[in-house]
Amino acid sequence: MYDFDTILDRTRTDCVKWAPSASCRSSAYPDVIPMWVADMDFASAPAIVEAMRLRAEHPVYGYSAKPESFFAAYTEWMRERYGVRVEREWLSFSPGIVPAIATAIRAFTERGDGVAITPPVYHPFKHMIERNRRAVVEAPLVVRDGRYAFDLDALDAACARSKLLVLCSPHNPVGRVWTAEELGAVAEIAERRDVVVMADEIHADLVFAPARVVSSLEIGDGLRKRLVSAWAPSKTFNIAGLQASCVVIPDPALRSAFEAEGDATGIGSPNCMAQGAAVAAYSEGGPWLDEALRYMRGNYEALAAGLAKKAPAIKVFPLEGTYLAWLDFSGVGLEGDVGPAVIDRAGVWLDSGARFGTGGGGFARMNLGCPRSVVEKATERLAKAFG
């Protein structure tokens, strides 16, 4: 029903993913395939495109009102798709998840306070902590039986030194979808150590069966009273450039503190194009998402099978959620920042695992939100270079 195979030329759209970079030149290929930053190369759902077209036809692009229709569409999406009840009064607006994290850091901690993270993890977490003059406290993930997991002892120790835990759920870049049991263990630590939990759940709609997303909102009252959960249609429906997200804060005192800090930094309503697109996404985008997930699962299977056959020393970790494959290049002798070597030898631009902090050296993250032919071409190049 939807076309995910057509290669769309994005080179003249000022997009970050396809922007030329002097550091991305290959000695083996005249072109470099960009598979790094996490946005898709697919056309967005037709309903979103139509909503954008209709809004653009009105020639006045002034300030937008408070995004009530966006909030209503989000709460209905959560109810219908996940059976999760979200009350309207719990919701605040943010232009994105990273601004929401920065707001939470300033709202719930003071300069010099510890903020816990679980690396390797989305690199803006650390950046926002440091830029806001807080202390990064790490509880690195561990690998058990070929699968990433929390080190609960390390997490407990980190939370003992912190006021805030920034949780990535599902986890970017390792592709884990945390279970209810795992999130419950995190919640117990947060309650015992009295830390606020800032949950980045932007990839929660991007989960592959048999994994099932469990939102932090489902874990219980003990976590809810210390929870800030951030969701957005941006990754789900490939509209990151529109910059609109929902921040869910059940506790009134936390919500008041968060909104006061957001007000102090000038965070307001969405741009005039974002609201209609987000409403269309949550109201009509479900069938498109379901098909996109099936397609991207096929992309992952093509990558994993191709490398297992032709370059078995590159380990592909299981992908439960996100459309981002996590590749271990240590078996082919690459360590630390592997990105430049992969670009030079294979002509494939991946996001180097070293960017994601402790435990990321020797790894790279590969974006599978693209046509199958691109995945197959990149797989062949990796196999030729490292097989």
Image (cartoon, rainbow, N blue to C red):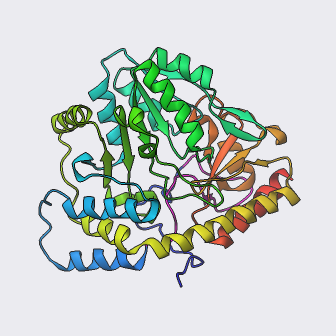
Q: In this rendering, would 302 be left or right of 357?
A: right
Q: Is residue 156 left or right of residue 109?
A: right
Q: Main secondary structure of the magenta part?
A: loop
Q: Is residue 347 above or below residue 285?
A: above
Point 14% across, 76% down: residue: 59
Q: Nearer the viewer, residue 290 or 37?
A: 290
Q: Which residues are magenta?
A: 22-44
Residue extending furthest toward the bottom: 1
Check residue 23 for magenta coloring: yes
Q: Residue furthest front?
A: 221
Looking at the rendering, which quadrant does residue 101 occupy?
Answer: top left
Rendered location of residue 75, percent (x, y) = 32, 59
* Residue 56 rendering spot, x and y as whole percentages: 22, 75
Q: Nearer the viewer, residue 17 or 241?
A: 241
Residue 11 placement (x, y as % from top left)? 47, 66
Which of the 4 quarters of the picture holds residue 112?
top left
The reply to whether residue 240 is in sight is yes
Nearer to the camera, 220 or 298: 220
**Quick check: 109 left or right of 185?**
left
Residue 43 visible at all: no
Query: What's the residue at 78%, 63% (across, down)?
Result: 380
Q: Residue at x 20, y 80 (%)?
A: 57
Q: Which residue occupies 62% across, 66% down?
A: 296
For residue 335, above or below residue 303: above
Above or below: residue 185 compared with residue 89: above
Q: Position of residue 153 (x, y in %)?
A: 61, 20
260 is within the stretch colored magenta: no
